[in-house]
Amino acid sequence: MSASGPEGLRGNVPSGAGKEDGFLNKGLEGLSHNFVTGTLEELVKWARARSVMPATFGLACCAIEMMATGGAHYDLARYGMETFRASPRQADLMIVAGRVSQKMAPVLRQIHDQMMEPKWVISMGVCASSGGMFNNYAIVQGVDQVVPVDVYAPGCPPGPQTLMHAILTLHAKIRSGELTQRRDANGGGGAGIEVTQVDGQTDTGAVRLLQPTTKD
Amino acid sequence: MSSDTDTDPELADLIAQTSEESQGLSRGSGLDRLREMGAVLRLSEADAADLEGEAGDADQTMIINMGPQHPSTHGVLRLMLELQGETVLRTKPIIGYLHTGMEKTGETLTYLQGATNVTRMDYASPLFNELAFALAVEALLGVEVPVRATWIRMLMTEMNRISSHLLFLATNGMDLGAVSMMLFGWREREEVLRFLETVTGLRMNHNYIRPGGVAADLPDGWADQVLALLDLIPPRLEEYDTLMTGQPIWRERLQGVGVITADEAVALGATGPILRSTGYAWDLRRDQPYLAYDELDFDVVVGSYGDAFDRYAIRLNEVRESMKLVRQIVDKMPSGDYRVQDKKVTPPPRARIDESMEALIHHFKLFTEGFQVPAGETYAAVESPRGELGCYIVSDGGAKPYRLRVRGPSFVNLQTLPHMMRGGLMADAVAVISSVDPIMGEVDR
Amino acid sequence: MSDASAEEVADPEDAAPEPEPTPEKHGVPVTDSLGQEVLHPTREQYRDLVETLRGEGYLVCIDLTAVDYLAHPHRETAPGVDPERFELVVSFLSHEHRARTRLRVQVPVDDATVASIVDLHPGADALEREVFDMFGIVFEGHPDLTRILMPEDWDGHPLRKDYGVGAIPVQFKGAGKEERT
């Protein structure tokens, strides 16, 4: 192979590698697949779904049910998820279990930002999903105001079976690759739900919207 | 070389791209290239050891932050610890990370809905919150609760005390490293929650004890289920004794840790196992009985040293005392109504709504507008697994409380934390927090 | 509990019965609220009364809270006690006598300061901070009067009656896109 410039120096790379939607920028999804890489991607998704490590983010009553799900009767260990990692750097799933107060929201955002990609968020319970029964000054009305959520688990608190259903839904979404595709469509966040404000309000006031923390 | 770059512009490009300048590297001398000289600590090891030896020098202390998200399973409590080496000097517990505005929300909910709100304060023992609220409302209403409802309330709250203490044992074990204790505690707790689910319909946050009585009668076969539980738990408690109580490692880690004296505890307003661990025998069930506790025979478990081991042992033995109480309640449970039959307060049974117009109207009014409570103010207190749980309600005569105040025991008990941690090691901080057993829902409300 | 009351029964032949003197305890009016003893000191009498009660055996300050009576100004207080907007409600417990007592101190909104009892009852520390946070009542002599439940830079005192609950309107999926008033 003749030395024909920088591309030549880097060896034999698939065409389109350095382009914006090439694999150097978009990971496996950016590859124009052949049989080998397609199977490789399936393998990666299979492995990711089966080795999810949750981060400890139990806040209130839902945390008790989350711990019960990890207990002997309902057993998260069958999915390899019984070790809740205290350090967000080691975790890839954040189960927001409980009501998020105004004081806690920046902390939530900071912990989420410290997690490495790929990362997922399950909003456990109605308080995390929408503010629940506490529609007041103190509670963030839905944790998706602060972090992008992939699965919402309703309940007050959701029993272990509901939480496991949410986790299995997440596993299915990881397996199908749906999540990474959705993220791109939305500019990197959320579960793809669009909310239109039909009552003409432009400023809901009660919710403090946070800027993503910049890494210095 | 230069001839090559002259003739081969691409090669020249490549060299230029990889040269130091293009990659932002400076050409200055070694030290100039560093951004900051102040990052390197130049201190000999001997000097550092000398520094540690100097006691009482405020400049040498370090303030570290623990929480609000941390592996200790006690919710969103943040601690600022002032350390000198490994010794904790001063502590500031910072709370408010779970403030839910429940007292404000309580002013917008009717008295029938109020139980759903207060039950989520102390979420490890929700029935106690509901009980305190119901007792306060009933005092304002001036209704007398039927005797069966009183005994059902005692049964359910004692079962809740058992499940709350099992949660404490599980989390205390796990915080100290006995991770299998977490699984054991939860195993037993699931059985108790199964019983609570059979009676109330929910595993947690039951909304079962309401002003006027309880929401539904005990189902058939409840006594058998309770007695089966009472047979299941004592051997498991023996297991915990083997795993923890007699074990040297456990004792070393908890004895002498987090000591508090009776004077301090009383001055700080601490109640519950923290106060009883100092040897002070104050238990509302015995000393200011509510419900029908004066008709039951039980012991108040008291410690002697005021340390974390005493608090652990007290809670373990309170499970045994609660089982004793439950056995007596099963024997003595009276028959009768499960809630007061005052139509202005209690919704009619669902079946009656089909038959009677009046019942339908009462149902409608009670669930939309709620019942009016005469103006006044009162305070009702119960002995929750964490201490004295009080409810102060001010009514202006309307259907919603004018002011709902819940005195959460953990809020006041947390004030003992700095005193317990003073002079101890940082590694014991988790053990001390765990022994206080705070539930942040009632701390922050 | 002993009332130092001297009730005078009205002579039926009189045109107007003589007013009963207000029952008093330690120099402050005392009333009975559904079987519970309530004392009504003024702000000036408050701290001394707490000290007196300590001497009597009420060693535990079990609860310290406040009520904003903006929407219920004509509630019942003791005879001779003028209601103000805020009321500080402090409960004490005596283990020795197995007795409780409650103090209701009237606090006006334009001068919302009360003496702090932290040096007498260290357990009132966090409770007073909470009252300051939620109502804006300042406790003189408190070592660290800062917000405890809300973030430190929060504006307003949430439990006051003129502070809204802060509910946001709930949108329902499928709600029509017509103009709504």
Image: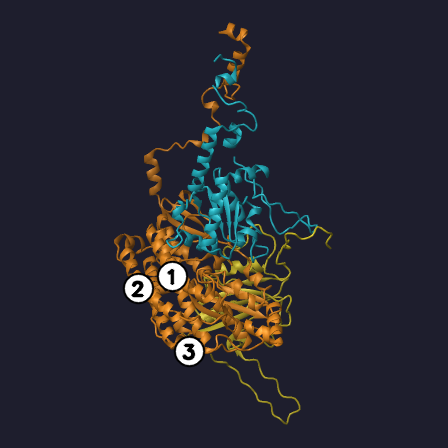
Circle 1 residues within 10 Å: few <14, some 14–19, many ≥20: some
Q: Tell which chain the image draws in orange.
A: B
Q: Are marks 1 and 3 in contact (CB under 8 Å)?
A: no
Say whether residue C48 is visible: no
Q: Is disc 3 placed on a helix, strand or loop?
A: loop
Secondary structure of the residue carrying tag 1 is: helix
Could you tell me residue A104's position as x and y percent? 52, 49
The image shows residue B227, relative to residue B250, as above or below, that is: below
Residue B334, disc: 3
Are callouts 2 and 3 both on one chain? yes
Disc 1 and disc 3: Cα gap in Å? 25 Å
Q: CA distance from mark 1 to mark 2?
A: 13 Å
Q: Which residue is mark 1?
A: B191
The chain identifier of the residue carrying mark 3 reads B
How many numbered marks appear?
Answer: 3
Q: Earlier along the polypeptide chain: callout 1 or callout 2?
A: 1
Chain A colour as displayed: cyan
Marks 1/2 same chain:
yes
Q: Residue at x 40, y 42 (%)?
A: B60
Percent position of residue C133, x then y: 56, 57
